[in-house]
């Protein structure tokens, strides 16, 4: 995958803005707790420590990586949207699950796809498919066309 410096900077900036937004949400939750209940200083510190530990633990489990957002099958040119992918600890993506117009294909090797659009983000290496998937489409395993 080739990417320009400007595009990489833009993607990193977007990712950082998302994390800043998450931190702001946590701060708002802490403020709501403060509004609902008078906390002692010790209780407030405990809430903050607990929330920060949870965020840091989640970040430790997350892997920052570039992955495909729109792909084409090299063998046919058919285009689709990746809805999930494998993710190794080093950020490598080896296989994708792709939603095409008429079906969802699981286990497509990354090298069997042309990346038409990519994005940089982070998440845990194990996760569920994207939520906006058309579950009425049949799911099939990838088979090499000969």
Image (tube, rainbow, N blue to C red):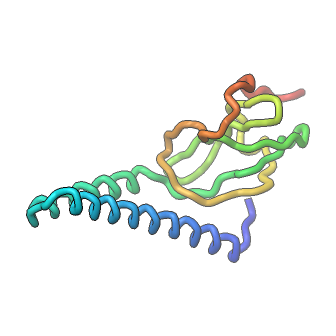
Nearest the viewer among 20 and 35 is 35
Say if residue 106 shows up in the picture: yes
Q: Residue furthest bottom?
A: 6
**Residue drawn 86% across and 28% down?**
145
Is 28 positioned to the left or the right of 37 in the image?
right
**Residue drawn 74% across and 44% down?**
81
Q: Quadrant of the N terminus?
A: bottom right
**Residue drawn 33% across and 65% down?**
27
Give the answer, above or below, for where 132 lies relative to 36: above
Which percent across, then down, holds residue 135? 67, 28
Q: Quadrant of residue 146?
A: top right
Which percent across, then down, holds residue 113? 79, 44
Is 52 positioned to the left or the right of 144 in the image?
left
Which percent across, then down, holds residue 122? 52, 55
Q: Quadrant of residue 38?
A: bottom left
Nearest the viewer among 55 and 125 is 55
């Amino acid at each position: 995958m080739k990417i320009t410096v400007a595009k990489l900077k833009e993607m990193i900036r977007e990712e950082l803005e998302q994390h800043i937004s998450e931190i702001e949400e946590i701060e708002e939750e802490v403020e709501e707790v403060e509004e609902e209940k008078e906390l002692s200083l010790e209780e407030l510190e405990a809430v903050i420590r607990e929330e920060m530990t949870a965020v840091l633990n989640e970040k430790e489990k997350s892997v920052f990586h570039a992955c495909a957002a729109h792909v084409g099958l090299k063998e046919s040119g058919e285009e689709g949207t990746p809805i999930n992918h494998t993710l190794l600890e080093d950020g490598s993506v080896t296989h994708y699950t792709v939603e095409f117009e008429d079906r969802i294909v699981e286990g497509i090797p990354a090298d069997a796809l042309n990346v038409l659009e990519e994005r940089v983000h982070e998440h845990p290496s194990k996760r569920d498919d994207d939520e906006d998937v058309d579950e009425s489409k049949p799911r099939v395993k990838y088979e090499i066309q000969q």
